[in-house]
Amino acid sequence: MKIREIVELLEADVLCGADRLESEVHSACGSDMMSDVLAFVKDQAVLLTGLVNAQVVRTAEMMDMRCIVFVRGKMPPPDVIELADDSGLVLLSCRERMYVACGRLYTHGLTGGGVVGE
Amino acid sequence: MTLHYDIDGENFQTAGEASANVKKVLRQLGISTDIIRRVAIAMYEGEINMVIHANGGVADVAITPDRIEMTLEDSGNGIPDIALAMQEGYSTAPENVHELGFGAGMGLPNMKKYTDEMKIESTVGVGTKVFMAVNLK
């Protein structure tokens, strides 16, 4: 799935990385606990979360993710958007709650992929 | 090659800067993506720990032909029971850290999981020194 399709499916706003929407992503994860993302995620390119602090961007950066989707209409502060842009990430914000946003992407083929240890 | 970083304990927002820089350097050196990710995650967890628990500290990274070694040292309260701290889910992080997405008791276990060697030396009231290494071969 291209990131552009995520934008369309979730009617999301693009906060940064508008020039990177043609990137292909193959799996995603949803979490508000960055410790768990660092512990269990493997090769998921998209992170859906309700947290908007700088550590969400840092976590995605460490995991080589491509895109963060903020759910529940959350908006990160400008310095967080700038950090993400510098890191080459795409930031999106959508109104849907976590469960619905994940479900919509999943039913359109963006699955969870594998987890570490499996 | 050696790298040195001062980890600012006052600002949670800047935690991760050192790890991001290490990642960039390793990428420039042409190290494989898998190795870089393991180093970056282990160092990032260590950095977060120093900010949450020890008011910052120093991090030194040595890159040799055989492996990447990270030494993180702080002058915090120390860890009274290292075996307990190594258990998944055990955390002494304050509640406000949970709201930031950390404090699930996964930091030290994660650091061990992603590295080939890990040693912790800690003295209560003096500080903690964490050594981690990821083999390149």
Image (tube, rainbow, N blue to C red):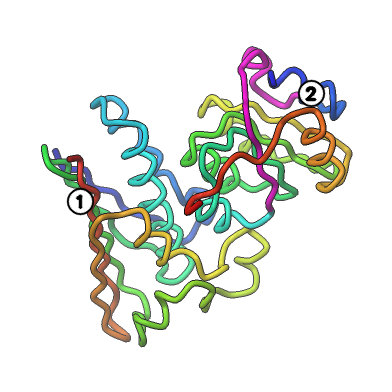
**Residue B103's x, y, as percent?**
56, 68
Give the amino acid at mark 1. Answer: Glu
Residues in magenta, as a range: A14-31
> Which of the two residues, B44 or A99, is positioned nearer the viewer here?
A99
Q: Are marks 2 and 1 in contact (CB under 8 Å)?
A: no
> Which of the two residues, B95 or A33, is positioned nearer the viewer here?
A33
* Within-10-Å neighbours for mark 1: few <14, some 14–19, many 20+: many
Q: Which residue is mark 1?
A: B69
Q: Residue at (69%, 54%) from the top-left corner?
A: A32
Q: Is residue A27 above or below residue A114?
A: above
* Within-10-Å neighbours for mark 2: few <14, some 14–19, many 20+: some
Q: Residue at (60%, 66%) from the top-left corner?
A: B97
Residue closest to the far left:
B65
Q: Which residue is mark 2?
A: A7
Tell how many labels.
2
> Which of the two residues, A4 or B1, is positioned nearer the viewer here?
A4
Q: Secondary structure at mark 2?
A: helix
**Residue A17's x, y, as percent?**
64, 20
Give the amino acid at mark 2. Answer: Val
Q: Is residue B84 above or below residue B23?
A: below
Quadrant position of the N terminus of chain A in the picture? top right
